[in-house]
Image: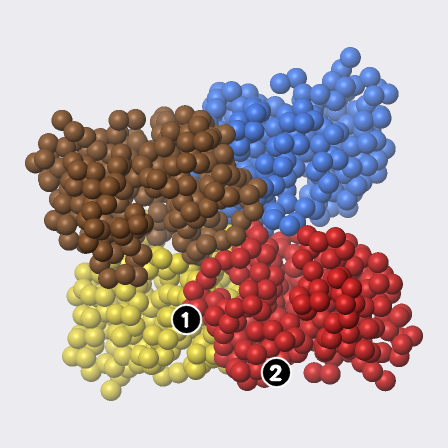
Chain colours: A yellow, B red, C brown, D blue
Amino acid sequence: MDSIDINCDLGEGFGIYKPVDDAALMKLISSCNIACGFHAGDPVLIRKTIDSALENQVKIGAHPSYPDLQGFGRRDMQLSEEELYTNVLYQVSALKGMVEALGGKMNHVKPHGALYNASARDEAISAPVYQAIFDVDPNLYVFGLPNSIHESVATKKGLKFIPEAFGDRRYLSTGALAPRSMDGAVINDLDNVSAQVVSIIRKGKVNTLDDQLFDIHAKTICIHSDTANSLDILKTLHTVLRSHKIEIKSDR
Amino acid sequence: MDSIDINCDLGEGFGIYKPVDDAALMKLISSCNIACGFHAGDPVLIRKTIDSALENQVKIGAHPSYPDLQGFGRRDMQLSEEELYTNVLYQVSALKGMVEALGGKMNHVKPHGALYNASARDEAISAPVYQAIFDVDPNLYVFGLPNSIHESVATKKGLKFIPEAFGDRRYLSTGALAPRSMDGAVINDLDNVSAQVVSIIRKGKVNTLDDQLFDIHAKTICIHSDTANSLDILKTLHTVLRSHKIEIKSDR
Amino acid sequence: MDSIDINCDLGEGFGIYKPVDDAALMKLISSCNIACGFHAGDPVLIRKTIDSALENQVKIGAHPSYPDLQGFGRRDMQLSEEELYTNVLYQVSALKGMVEALGGKMNHVKPHGALYNASARDEAISAPVYQAIFDVDPNLYVFGLPNSIHESVATKKGLKFIPEAFGDRRYLSTGALAPRSMDGAVINDLDNVSAQVVSIIRKGKVNTLDDQLFDIHAKTICIHSDTANSLDILKTLHTVLRSHKIEIKSDR
Amino acid sequence: MDSIDINCDLGEGFGIYKPVDDAALMKLISSCNIACGFHAGDPVLIRKTIDSALENQVKIGAHPSYPDLQGFGRRDMQLSEEELYTNVLYQVSALKGMVEALGGKMNHVKPHGALYNASARDEAISAPVYQAIFDVDPNLYVFGLPNSIHESVATKKGLKFIPEAFGDRRYLSTGALAPRSMDGAVINDLDNVSAQVVSIIRKGKVNTLDDQLFDIHAKTICIHSDTANSLDILKTLHTVLRSHKIEIKSDR
């Protein structure tokens, strides 16, 4: 039986703000990426999210960000190499220590938002980011864009790279995600998300928004927790994948 | 030859603010307590302070605080038990992970400011604080007020309690520190600081501000880094302790 | 025809977090209290909330708080008189300037959460808070607890005090709100909220949780925007008040 | 007798951090730009700085910034037009209200750090920044780089533009400031600062770092308060300008 890892960014609230039903999503995924306090996530919420992941045997990753609570880590910020290195080191350390104190083990790291995108296109950014991850624990997996600077730099550092595809976003024939500003960039239709996910798993291909077939080899598939119908998407995906005899689980 | 541990709170700047010459103080002490980002300390400064401690073979502790950058952690805040537990868990975890990533080992924890004082007088506060420390690592030492709730709760949790005295502050006959608002509460005179420190080490006694002799058994002595002449105090202390054949070092 | 002012705390999101449908609530009230950035409210959201109030001809107030984003301003904090004065001065000034820049006029101020409660019971807290409001503009109205330190101190400062009652919370025979931890403290039932509001307006009385009749003379009634069914409460209230020939409007 | 306005950025501390002797500098300048809380400046410090400016009859300006306390507003951040507009609106409003509450009148606005530089080179950034200033008060002066996008956009918006030169920094023949990374970019020598200032005032020219004469017409000269010897620079400047019969004062 084939299997695939499904990951979600969780714990992305702050204080009284809990925009997403983390507990419900946690039952439907195999890996989660937990906000570390810099774009979202206060200590109470981080602990609650870790506890929930442990109960559901979901693999736990850190989801570090630029220090920008006001902008939810979605705005580019020009940090120095030392600032990048230490900001990631701090966040990944905080999450790792909490996970271990609560009886678990941290599995992976996936940078958030603007830091994810910037580190995928600029080695000067990904190098200190991945160095920090390596220095915390060289055995951590890193989730990132296949065939990007993510993959080359992570591999060069000696980290185990896990190529990630997106189930609820369309691609362009260049391999890039279609920007959210383009019509059709986000897939909300339950059948279309499922079809894209099955195609990625079984054929290693996606139909791009500009009508090409693009090769994509992914070992984890991200469903964005903050899309309006993320819970329905995941429920449908469960049914569809079961019917295709694909198990949702992490090999790691 | 007798010995004593001298500790300072370091890394208590933020961003461009570096009010104290941490590097100079680091050469004169045997233990440091590093701000974790909630009352002071950004990732760049935390890393720099850890590196400096490692170079100088100074024992490293975490110095967690209430989340209050504006008030430097000196204002009482009413946190729930869960907020106390997770805020300390987060900060101690962040520091521990950074210390280990940079090649060191965390030795101890000492709560900061209002959290130090509140946890010394209220078991409802010290219990979650010490539980968090224990859950991160039960082998961590905790620095605190002798014969206080610090000592009883830390011991009950199974943590190794290190009684702390203050070299640059006068005591009352109750054993409490004279509040900073009282005349003479802070000792700035170099000879008087030295005399008090030697008396604590050799006789286990201090002359209180209200003219009594008070028994105090301390295994570490704190010199506040943010008093104006802290560097001179530490230099004088070095000379005086050497003349008394007392070595500055940590046994831990 | 009788009339009553209905007020809501709005703009209590932050960044991407928008827990409440402010735009819908705004159509149903006559006064709003806008978070100023210290417990909630970022500049984009503040502006949006002001624009919405202006479109709906809703009176605008500032809703200043302790500086505690993590705790949503609900945690007691021990601020000095100067800290209280300047924190309120800053927040009320920011809101007033924005309202005026956007073409409106600020009408009132209502402290938030822990600051509301602390200033209702402690003159040492309410004095600097109301002094700051007075110094920004002595013509501002202040919303507060009737027959409390709010009323006496605001009046002493020369501010125009507007007594406030709560529609969705039960009272005790002491005149205090039943604490949220008591069974039945929050009224969710639409008819019961309406009945309490009508009783306050028409009879100046509430039935307390401990089965007494308590006199309460209010000129504004608060419905908490963050109760789950606040929108339904306000819609029902509109219908019920209309049937009682009570108009929702502010006289100020 | 000729005269010149000398401006300093003041109130650039935070909480316990007061890196500069604002009170001493305030006696030697005619205009100050006060940090508004986003890169530096807490409410207590802002109030203290305003009071000091009023005592010394120094003109008061707001010094708004990107929201980046960790980076002191010196890091580029990609804000949307709406984020730029509202972040500046909030900060300028807060400062204006406080100045007026404390008995003064706000005179001008000067963006800080990365926001100053970005708005000087990019109209998409300066347009919302200056619109916010205009909407708070169209009579506010704005200090900026002569012959830059600062000047053209501010003028287009109907704001009164005040061209600024720097006394303690060398220029390039392009008119740009030599970047701090270049040898000799910062002028620490007291005589050289004075000579450059006198040359700007009397001749409208500076000798550039690449040995050219460059025309510069400035109505205000900035001395950076955070250079190590800023107090000595200003004292020397006083003496030298007096000997040249140039008065330090603001015409506005």
Note whether A145 is above or below D192 in the view shown.
Answer: below
Note whether D220 is above or below B125 in the view shown.
Answer: above
**For numbered disc 2, what is the local secondary structure?**
strand
Q: Report if residue C16 is visible in the image.
A: yes
Say left or right for B17 vs D126.
Answer: right
Q: Chain of mark 2?
A: B
The residue nearer to you, when weighing C100 against A96, is C100
Q: Which residue is mark 2?
A: B160
Q: Which residue is mark 1?
A: A47
**For numbered disc 1, what is the local secondary structure?**
helix
Identity, as a three-letter code, of the amino acid under mark 2? Lys
Q: Percent from the top left, x then y, of residue A98?
A: 47, 74
Say left or right for B99 vs B229.
Answer: left
Residue appearing at x 39%, y 83% in the figure: A252
Q: Percent from the top left, x then y, of residue D182?
A: 73, 46
The image quadrant of residue C105 is top left
Residue appearing at x 23%, y 69% in the figure: A234
Q: Chain of mark 1?
A: A
Residue appearing at x 92%, y 75% in the figure: B243
Total marks shown come to 2
